[in-house]
Image (tube, grey):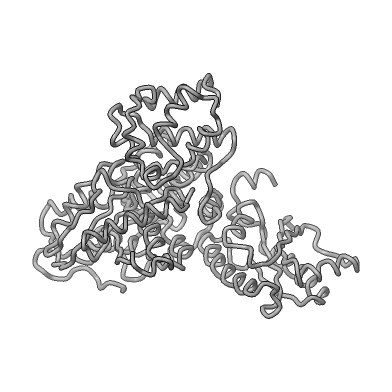
Amino acid sequence: MERVNLLGICCNWSPFACYNAAGMARLELPPNFRLIRVMCIGRINQALILRAFEYGADGVILLECKDEDCRYGPGPEVGHTNVQRVRNLLHLLGIGQKRLVERSFEADDREELVQALWDFARDIAALGTNPAKPRQEREAS
Amino acid sequence: MNLDDPRVKRIIRERSLSFCLECGKCSASCPRMLTGKQYSPRLLAHKLITEPEDEAYIENSVWECLTCGLCEERCPSGVEYSRFILEMRTLLAGTKGLQGCRAHDGALHSWMRLMTSPELEQNRLDWIGPELRVASSGPLAYFTGCAPYFDVFFSWIEVDTLSIARDSIRLLNFLDLKPVVLGEERCCGHDLLWTGDQENFETLCRLNYEEFKAAGVKEVVVSCPECYQVWSQFMPQVIPGFDLQVTLLMDLLEREIKKGGLAFKPFPRRVTFQDPCRLGRMAGRCDVPRNLLGRIPELTLKEMENSGRSAICCGNNGFINCDLYSKRIQVERLQEAKATTADLFITACPKCMIHLTCAMRDPLRQGSLALEIRDLVNVLAGQIEWSGGEDAIGTRRK
């Protein structure tokens, strides 16, 4: 199977607590998965998600808090709006809406988070590499 | 900046920068300087020739320009300022990386670069309804450009740039032309070119050229002035043996109308026209849109204070450096339009439409700048008819 590049963008609060707990418990994570930790998923805009694909990601997962758990207020709602808009662009580009995944977690959902990452890795591996990968990224990988 | 660098010397020579008289007409007309930005075209030329050691100033200034071309319009020495900026950006990008603060965090440049993938499989034709007659191969093609992407990305300011593409095809269909519209055409690369990304621009040019050649196209009709500039001026430089004929939609319309048989239904509105920089000054089409509008009965064209070759920029180009000075240019432009008492603002470039609509939607202005904005193509497609008066064109979608 082709090696795919997976990127997670993770909120610092509930999802990162899960991720941290999973690491402490030495739960296995997909090997080709990289994580970017941000203070809140509301910090992420359309451009940053698109840029992940521009820089060679084959799949992007946003790991966010439950709507009612956001430490700042509207973070996850901002995430939902951005995901919807970027999915429309991904559809136009033929990258496919399925390559952008959004999941939310409570602070003690470490098994759910690990399971979500494995599901994500399996789904993206099944889709293969992103067809709209710029030439420079193709040559680099 | 090393003045001994032969590439810099060549740019200065080829773009006639040494002919600068320091008369200051460029700076006195620069919309960016007039709105208070610390940027001066005259000083940039001066520094580059006499104080090349002031690298920080030169490099900042090169990325500040709007490339609207008003300065070179006024320059008595024929300095080709826009091309000078373009070549300096390409040079600087090659040595120091892409600069210029990218608007919308660079999302637009991202999708333009994503389109350089040869294996792209876009879904960009969803907007073509059954009322439009298009082909997948043939001699005449219509180049859509980024409109499908703009309408998704800018959904929050509710621009409808796809209406320009639809109405362009309706007009071509009306003239009994069935244009090829390709599902794998790319962005023309205008914004990448003007922001210094020559490599990806050339890739887009080649991919577009190959797609259109493969579809058997001989002539490409373009409605967007930026796409027209790229297709007619820059693509032939990138592609040896470029042999596609590139036609601006409004030129084609004017030609067809002169043959007779076509007329326009009355349009009792007071309108004003914004000359896009790539159409008016750079392609010399100031009269064509006015002639076309002049053919519409009962339409009153109210010119803005600065119009035609002196038109003021819509505030931004290539989606870099959108800042409060851009906003001020836009606000002043819209106030000029308001002062004409026109109730419809007509432009001919989707970018003007996007940038000015964005300024109109500014919540702090509380709608005081709001003005109905439409593209020239929308107005023409809505009013065209055969001279007999029969309504030959299909009903508008909205």
Residue A136 seen: yes
Q: Residue furthest right?
A: A25
Q: Nearer the viewer, residue B226 or B370?
A: B370
Whether residue B345 is situated above or below residue B247 in the rendered picture: below
Residue B278 appears at what percent x and percent y?
33, 45
Residue A68 spot, x, y in % from top left: 68, 80
The N terminus of chain B appears in which quarter of the rendering?
top right
Nearer the observer, B291 or B270 = B270
Q: Residue B387, percent across and down?
A: 10, 63
Residue lying at 52% horizontally and 38% vertically, measured from the top left: B60
**Residue A125 seen in render:** no
Most extreme residue toward the bottom, as rendered?
A68
Position of B117 relative to A121 (above/below)? above
Q: Nearer the viewer, residue B261 or B335?
A: B335
Quadrant of the snapshot with the C terminus of chain B: bottom left
Q: Name which residue lies at 40% across and 48% down.
A: B212
| Residue B27 place in picture, x, y as percent | 36, 37
Query: As drawn, is B365 to the left or to the right of B393?
Result: right
Q: Residue at x 23, y 58 (%)?
A: B272
The residue at 50%/62% (across/down) is: A92
Looking at the image, residue B77 sits to the left or right of residue A118; the answer is left
